[in-house]
Amino acid sequence: MLLLISPDGMEEALDCARAAEHLDIVDVKKPDEGSLGANFPWVIREVRDAIPADKPVSATVGDVPYKPGTVAQAALGAVVSGATYIKVGLYGCTTPEQAVEVMSGVVRAVKDHRPDALVVASGYADAHRIGCVNPLALPDIAHRSGADAAMLDTAVKDGTRLFDHVPPPECEEFVRRAHRAGLLAALAGSVKAEDLGCLTRMGTDIVGVRGAVCEGGDRTAGRIQPALVAAFRAELDRHARSRAAAGATG
């Protein structure tokens, strides 16, 4: 399972660089603009320059409206700025057809510029609170649009978490549907270290965290701490080893 960490700017990106051996993907976002708030193009470039070359950079395009052309241009801006994972939060899409239209435009814009970039269709575990597409529809949306991954996060950061809205059995079904469609499955949403055993067992490919590695567990006011990144990674690796051992003896 890959560990994705989300700094909110250059200072935290440098913290991620100091903890680079413990993470797999550096994800650029702007938490004060939403769950998947988009940061500035120059911040993406600066983060790309600040972290080791072998660590891919992910960038959020935002909690986007149903405006396919606008979103496609934003996605192109992210990949031109140096991101190789492009995440789109389908906040304003109320039907799968709208979501597929938005994501198809993103895929074309991104892949025309950089074919090896990975496009992530992101939905929300608490979709019922904001009126967007059902979480379990995301793998099919990603597959139909030609995206590379399906992701769930939470839209409303009020202390509720991924499993509060989509219980583990449904998350496991999300992962199963993604894998059946040939996609990566990514899960986030106030994920904590105690969730890693469950996420590992269900075969999650990417886990995204921020608050869990911030001082005081505060994704907005707290700052990413390299020591917390290292501790989170150690716990993730412990569960991975346990799963591998169980598989070897099963």
Image: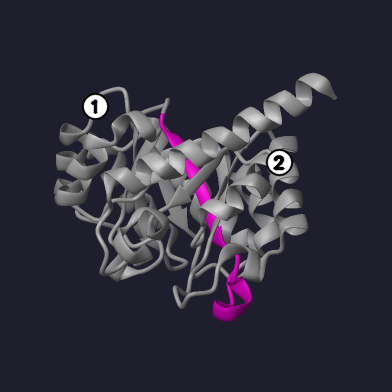
Residue type for callout 1: Pro
Considering depth in this image, is 245 or 139 the residue closer to the camera?
Answer: 245
Is 122 part of what is drawn in magenta? yes
Q: Residues within 10 Å of mark 1 (few under 14, many from 20)?
A: some
Q: Position of residue 219 (x, y in %)?
A: 34, 64
Which quadrant, please, contains the N terminus? Answer: top right
Q: Position of residue 80 (x, y in %)?
A: 25, 37
At 47% from the left and 37% from the top, the residue drawn is 234
Question: Dot 2 lies on which element?
Answer: helix
Above/below status of 193 relative to 54: below
Dot label at residue 52: 1
Residue 147 can be seen in this image? no
Residue extent of the magenta highlight: 117-132
Is 77 left or right of 172, judged from the image as shown?
left
What's the distance in space between the residues labelled 1 and 2, CA to CA?
A: 30 Å
Question: Which quadrant of the structure image shows residue 147?
Answer: top right
At 30% from the left and 32% from the top, the residue drawn is 20
Which quadrant, please, contains the C terminus? Answer: top right
Mark 1 in CB contact with mark 2 (< 8 angstroms):
no
